[in-house]
Image (cartoon, helix red, strand yellow):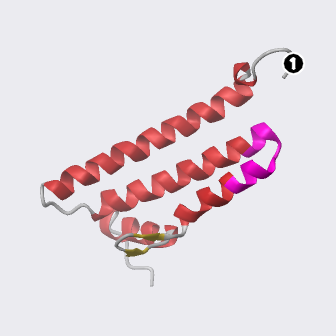
Amino acid sequence: MFGRPIGQNQGVQFPIAEAHIEVAAADLMRWRACELFDAKQPCGAEANMAKYLAAKASWEAANACIQFHGGFRLCARIRRRAQVPRDSALPGGAISTNLILCYVAEHVLGLPRSF
């Protein structure tokens, strides 16, 4: 684009860097949940936050891809696949983003039950 690699543009670099940061944060939270689980400590909050962060990171990365490439069919497929973890089932049972937020609000922040 404009005689140079597309990645040389800050408008492309910054969303890629943000996506990388979000994926790294999700990975760290995942490892924290694993450490707690291995130590037989409660890890529900960390596991829920890891899933939430990973789903959000994949969604934002897919949106960035669509913006960079103008919405080609492949990018639309990537975005659809990124949406699956946001509201899909985990191996242990179904859990949605809203249930994760309810869990964190109640068990981590100590807020009253919302339902």
Q: Quadrant of the N terminus?
A: top right
Label 1 secondary element: loop
Q: Nearer the viewer, residue 97 or 109?
A: 97
> Mark 1 Cα within 10 Å, few/some/many (few <14, many 20+)?
few
Q: Which of 85 and 17 is in front in this view?
A: 85
On the rendered structure, is 6 left or right of 86?
A: right
On the rendered structure, is 91 left or right of 75?
A: left
Residue 73 on the magenta span? yes
On the rendered structure, is 10 left or right of 22?
A: right
Is residue 31 shown above or below 41?
A: above
* Percent x, y of residue 88: 51, 70
Residue extending farthest to the top is 3
Magenta segment main secondary structure? helix
Residue extending farthest to the front is 74
Is residue 3 shown above or below 111?
A: above
Residue at 70% x, 42% y is 65
* Percent x, y of residue 112: 37, 76
Q: Mark 1 points at which residue?
A: 2
Q: Quadrant of the C terminus?
A: bottom left
Residue at 46% x, 58% y is 52
Segment colored magenta? 66-77
Q: Can you tell which quarter of the image residue 19 is in?
A: top right
**Amino acid found under the numbered disc labelled 1:** Phe
Residue extending farthest to the left is 39
Is residue 49 shown above or below 26?
A: below
